[in-house]
């Protein structure tokens, strides 16, 4: 009996890995959003968090989680519990997700900037790291179409994993045009 429940729990996790965050293009398990899976008979209770409070993706993710898990014949009901503790951070992501998103450690970013010019951007470095180096980049990005960057808390949450490349994709902006617009504002790129 216990072995069957463990197997079902594994199947639930596999189904959750099919649910992608539509802005980051990484599944919610590898993003570290899933905090727990509890099986109670034919009911599955999933404890999860979001990258930021008030995330507009809450309803979208809940709907897709329920659809995915209800594909398992043993599950007849799915409840999604939103939790805020522990607070989500980049450290909760798997190495595979960090690699996919191009997340670099602070040390790597610092090493790269000490050897280069002041205003060189890497499209694979997190937007949070870039804006910490160049605070004026926030306004520059807003002016070229990254309108969500000024939403309070975005840089501290999603900005930790969002890169210029992913951000352009999420905002449906052409990366070549983004780079060109930023070059006009005095930035260069490390490609």
Image: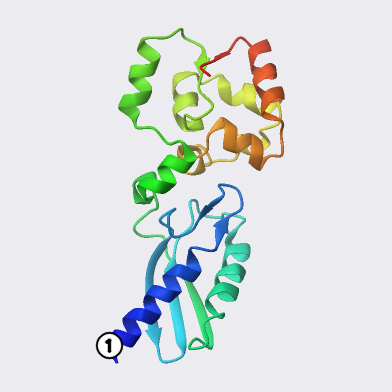
From the viewer's perspective, is residue 58 above or below residue 159? below
Identity of the residue drawn at 57% across and 75% down: 66
- Find numbered disc 1 in the image and state the secondary structure of the residue it sits on: helix
Where is mark 1, residue-wise? Answer: 2
Residue 61 vs residue 148, the one in the foreground: 61
Residue 25 visible in the shown view: yes
Residue shown at the point (38%, 17%) measured from the top left? 112
Left or right relative to 66: residue 46: left
Q: Is residue 139 above or below residue 33?
A: above
Q: Residues within 10 Å of mark 1 (few under 14, many from 20)?
A: few
Asked which colour scheme the image uses, the reply is rainbow
Q: Residue at x 40, y 47 (%)?
A: 96
Q: Is residue 38 visible?
A: no
Residue depicted at 53% across the width and 88% down the height: 76
Horizontal and vertical percent position of residue 153: 51, 42
Q: Position of residue 120 (x, y in %)?
A: 51, 14
Give the image quarter of residue 179.
top right
Q: Quadrant of the N terminus?
A: bottom left
Q: Is residue 61 above or below residue 67?
A: above
Outermost residue on the left side: it is 2
Numbered label tally: 1
Quadrant of res 185: top right
Percent position of residue 45, x then y:
44, 78
Q: Nearer the viewer, residue 82 or 61?
A: 61
Q: In the image, 19: left or right of 40?
A: right
């Amino acid at each position: 009996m216990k072995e069957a429940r463990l197997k079902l729990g594994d199947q639930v996790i596999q189904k959750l890995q099919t649910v992608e965050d539509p802005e980051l293009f990484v599944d919610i398990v590898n993003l570290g959003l899933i905090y727990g899976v509890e099986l109670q008979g034919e009911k599955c209770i999933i404890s999860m968090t979001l990258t930021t409070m008030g995330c507009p993706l809450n309803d979208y993710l809940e709907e897709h989680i329920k659809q995915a898990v209800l594909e398992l014949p043993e599950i007849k009901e799915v409840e999604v519990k939103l939790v805020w503790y522990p607070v989500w951070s980049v450290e909760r992501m798997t190495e595979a997700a960090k690699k996919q998103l191009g997340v670099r450690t602070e040390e790597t970013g610092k090493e790269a900037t000490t050897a280069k010019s002041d205003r060189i951007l890497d499209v694979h470095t997190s937007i949070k790291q870039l804006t910490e180096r160049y605070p004026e980049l926030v306004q520059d990005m807003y002016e070229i179409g990254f309108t969500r960057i000024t939403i309070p808390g975005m840089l501290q949450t999603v900005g930790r994993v969002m890169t210029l490349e992913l951000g352009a994709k999420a905002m449906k902006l052409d990366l070549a045009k983004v780079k060109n617009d930023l070059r006009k504002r005095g930035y260069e790129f490390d490609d």
